Image: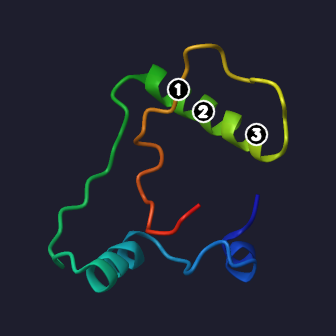
Amino acid sequence: VFTGRGALKAKLVDEIGGEDVAKAWLVKSKGLSDDLDIRTYEPKDPVDRLVSAEALIQGFARLLGAGVDLVSDGVTLDGLVSVWHPDGAK
């Protein structure tokens, strides 16, 4: 787990910033319209929040080398947890 500045120093990220920086990158690098619509996903069901939290915990556990599943069978990432993937990201 890194702070933003630590991740920048370790070259894990290109920039530090929020939605405005990400949008500016999309406009400049990918030629998207400056008036592009930004959508924020909010789970409607409290269970969805729990599933997302469990998926994040599982991801961190794997990152740290845990070889066991910490999340029950059948719980998967819903795809909206990680939307921002610039080209070349690993």
Helix, strand or loop at label 2? It is helix
Name, please, the residue furthest toward the front. Answer: 88
Q: Residues within 10 Å of mark 1 (few under 14, many from 20)?
A: few
Q: Give the Cα distance between marks 2 and 1.
A: 7 Å
Q: Is residue 44 above or below residue 10?
A: above
Identify the residue under disc 2. Answer: 55
Q: Quick one: SS at disc 3?
A: helix
Q: Earlier in the sequence, mark 1 or mark 3?
A: 3
Q: Is residue 85 left or right of residue 33?
A: right
Q: Which residue is mark 1?
A: 76
Q: Amino acid at mark 3?
A: Arg
Classify the position of the N terminus by image quarter. bottom right
Disc 3 vs disc 2: which is toward the camera?
3
On the image, which quarter does residue 33 sit in? bottom left
Q: CA distance from mark 3 to mark 2?
A: 11 Å
Q: Which residue is mark 3?
A: 62
Labels 1 and 3 touching (C-beta < 8 A): no
Closer to the N terminus: mark 2 or mark 1?
2
- The amino acid beneath tag 2 is Ala
